[in-house]
Amino acid sequence: MSNPHCRQAFLFSALLAVFAGAAPARAQFSLPGASAAVSSASAPVPGQPCVMLFGQGRNFDPAQPAANRQWDEANSAFNLAAREPLVAAGLPVVNVMLPVAATDVPANLQGLLAEVRRLGCTRVLETAVFADAAQGLLIARLRVYPVLGVLGPQAPGSEPRIGAVAYTQQKEFALDARVMERVNPSRLGRAMAEEALPSFAPAGARP
């Protein structure tokens, strides 16, 4: 009988071979282990709220460094493509990517909040592409969070914080190599971000 772990590893390799691709070069970012991209057309402007487009995969395996790199590449392609509809809509956007190996969640959150405070971002759009082996699914997900405590009067010593999820969009695909051949992370990122655009409209302007 074949080893289930080997079968799972084969499926992951098959989908990653399709998913992973070279991402545009990005400047180094101050959040440990992270990188960021800011284009001059959409760079944050002092006094103008920005959107932090934060991406990270979920499938870290210390014994599979090549697979980890491929998950990082797939998530980078998905994240960078998601910025395009936001930039086209005139939103100042900063892309931040963490590798799957960055598993210290409290440290990640602390670094993210420090950058949110420094840049004045009022929303975080989280992007993630990951495999749920238990359900046999590849999942692509967007979540929008408000950043509280950035705009308006602030009490001395107060710090910004991430609010509850305001918007979620999730696409699910069978974790099968034949299905993965028809899925492209860049096209998926653009399409999902376009669908998410209404969530960035002012509350009074939403349908």
Image (cartoon, rainbow, N blue to C red):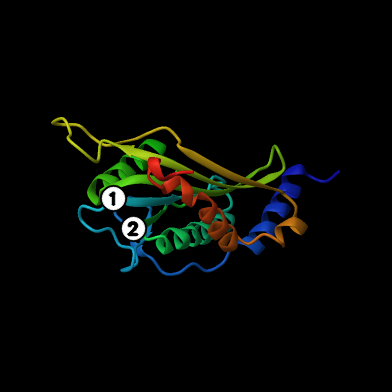
Q: For the view shown, which residue lies furthest in the right direction? A: 1
Q: Residue at x 76, y 49 (%)?
A: 7
Using a 10 Å C-alpha cutoff, classify the residue at mark 1 as few (fewer than 14 neighbours), some (14 to 19) or many (20 or more). Answer: some
Q: Is residue 136 above or below residue 87?
A: above
Q: Nearer the viewer, residue 179 or 155?
A: 155
Residue 141 visible in image: yes
Q: Nearer the viewer, residue 38 or 76?
A: 38
Total labels drawn: 2
Q: On the image, numbered disc 2 is attached to which residue?
A: 92
Number of the label disc, if any, that sits on residue 49: 1
Using a 10 Å C-alpha cutoff, classify the residue at mark 2 as few (fewer than 14 neighbours), some (14 to 19) or many (20 or more). Answer: many
Residue type beneath disc 1: Pro
Q: Residue at x 37, y 36 (%)?
A: 106
2 and 1 marks in contact (CB < 8 Å): yes
Q: Which quadrant of the structure image shows residue 113?
A: top left
Q: Residue at x 28, y 50 (%)?
A: 49
The secondary structure type at the circle numbered 2 is: loop
Mark 2 → mark 1, Cα distance in angstroms: 7 Å
Q: Judge left or right: residue 64 versus residue 100.
A: right
Q: Is residue 192 above or below residue 88?
A: above
Residue type beneath disc 2: Pro
